[in-house]
Image: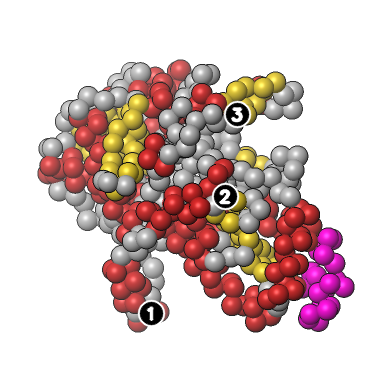
Amino acid sequence: MKRIGILTAGGDTPAMNATIHGAVVRANQLKVEVFGLIKGFNSLFNPRVPHVHLNPLYQEIPEIDPTKGGTIIGSSRDYVDPEKKAELDLVASRLEGLGVEGLICVGGDGTLNGLQPLAERLPTVLAPKTIDNDLGLNYPHEPDEWVRVKDPQANHGSRYEQRASHAMFDLEYMVNYVTPGYATAVFVSAGGVERIRTTAESHRRIAIIEVMGRHSGYIALGSAYGRPDIILVPEHPLDLEHLVERVKQLYDLQKNVVIVCGEGIVDNRGRELGAETKTTDPAGNIALSGAAEALRHKFIQMIGDRYFQLYRRGTAREAIFTRKVGHTQRGGRPILFDRFYAAQLGAKAVELLLEGHNNAVATLQYNSKRGFYVDGYDANRFRDRWGYIHARHMFPAFYDPKLMKPSRIGIDYLLPIFTDAIGEDDMEHMRRTLFSQGNLAQPYHSINTDVNKRIRYVTSVVGETDSEIAPAPMPDLAKHLGTGAAKSEK
Ligand code: F6P
């Protein structure tokens, strides 16, 4: 293999550049060219295939910086639908036209779902990324527990449910113990929780802090490091009575309460609190908006003004406030743990391709003797019996629903990741850069400006004539083609 492609797909994470860096460093050692495809699969839906040569003369371009968040080659939620054979063929022929012999997708569960049909056309490997930590298996046979049940309300008339496990759980059997991006997201969330505490204390308020993670409670679990009083995770339906009772107990005692809720929390009928206004992103994921706000409304009704007036002036509405950690948990400099292992996973993905693996995933494994190490895993083993790959939920026993906090085993899960997750340079970097005088005087220089100058386009693609290129984008992809790409070609 002399030339490979790499793309970053789905929601960004702080560690994607570190993965690209790891892949390019290893490719340089092995004398393999790496082409970065711009904006994930979007690049391949464009007949001109915008791309950047990331290692001309086997030297990494200077824009690749593993300590910078985001991804210099851009990401999008464009998605390769395994059902769309013609689209897949087109994608493969465009890669062939580019001389790319193998592909690394830096992605999550959505990308992994599209991997197999792509792998039938060219060698493809996934390097994992997601702040949600939902790419992986809590135990190897987890995919076998999924069943499909009829549901006239659901898409295609059915939905998936996960049955309870019959196996003894062991942390060391987890497949892809943790995903790059997760540690930094927890670092930001836990820091936010810690900061909100003192203001809640000063003003005798109840703070409800919403963290990301979709239907997986891993980020909420990790935010325990910020010492909230209560954590709510999507894997355990809300018991409102129990929750309100505990909130009042805490408030009676300390006159403030800090609650963390995962954005995907559900009520006792399994309905998502935050999905009251339901929308979906291009990959079909439900966009969750406002679990914390929904919870606040329930508290206002159930606790009432009179209760708060015992302790402070004002109404329940004033006493209870919400904050979303939001996209700050997805951006910025990755902490040491993330960038170190993201780079290793990028390098492993290159090795897997060159060793002849296909439809494989580079995984980050853990055992108490070796610590963390990278490995390869067959992507097919993530599939359920219908061929679908599910986002991993937080392993339910990591959480104690009575205490509403991590359980003993949940703590055991978190410790290896976070004990030494922050590097000295992470703190030093902040000390040196945040209040630098230049920040005030100079405009922000976006990395995109530099990368744009390096973007190249193919002029003709195998199987596509020029006349095919211009006027006939596939209807559902039309929005991704055209103006942006055409303009920057000039
Ligand atoms: O999957 C990553 C994630 O950050 C989720 O935690 C969150 O629900 C979603 O992406 C937000 O997506 P967007 O940035 O498109 O609003």
- Considering the numbered disc 3 on the image, is that residue within a helix, a strand or a loop? loop
Circle 2 or circle 1, nearest the eye: 2
Q: Nearer the viewer, residue 164 or 55?
A: 164
**Residue positioned 38% across, 48% down in the render:** 180
How packed mark 2 is, by other alpha carbons closer than 10 Å (few <14, some 14-19, many 20 or more), is: many
Judged from the image, the secondary structure of the residue bearing numbered disc 2 is strand
- Looking at the rendered image, the disc whose residue lies closer to the viewer, 1 or 3, is 3
Residue 143 point in image, percent of width and height? 50, 27
Tell me the CA gap for discs 2 and 3. Answer: 18 Å
Q: Quadrant of the C terminus?
A: top left
Residue 166 visible here: yes
Q: Are marks 1 and 3 in contact (CB under 8 Å)?
A: no
Residue 338 vertical position relative to residue 432 in the rendered view, above or below: above
Name the residue that disc number 1 marks: 435
Choose the circle earlier in sequence order: 1 or 3.
3
The front one of 478 and 33 is 33
Magenta stretch, residue numbers: 300-318
**Who comes first in sequence, dot 2 or dot 1?**
2
Task: Please report the residue visible at 65 percent of the width from the left and 26 percent of the height from the top.
Answer: 159
The type of residue carrying mark 3 is: Arg
What is the x, y in percent for residue 220?
A: 55, 54
- Rendered image quadrant of residue 246: bottom right
Query: Residue placed farthest to the right in the image?
Result: 306
- Whether label 2 lies within 8 Å of ligand 1 gets the answer no
Residue holding disc 2: 399
Instruction: Answer whether residue 333 is magenta in the image.
Output: no
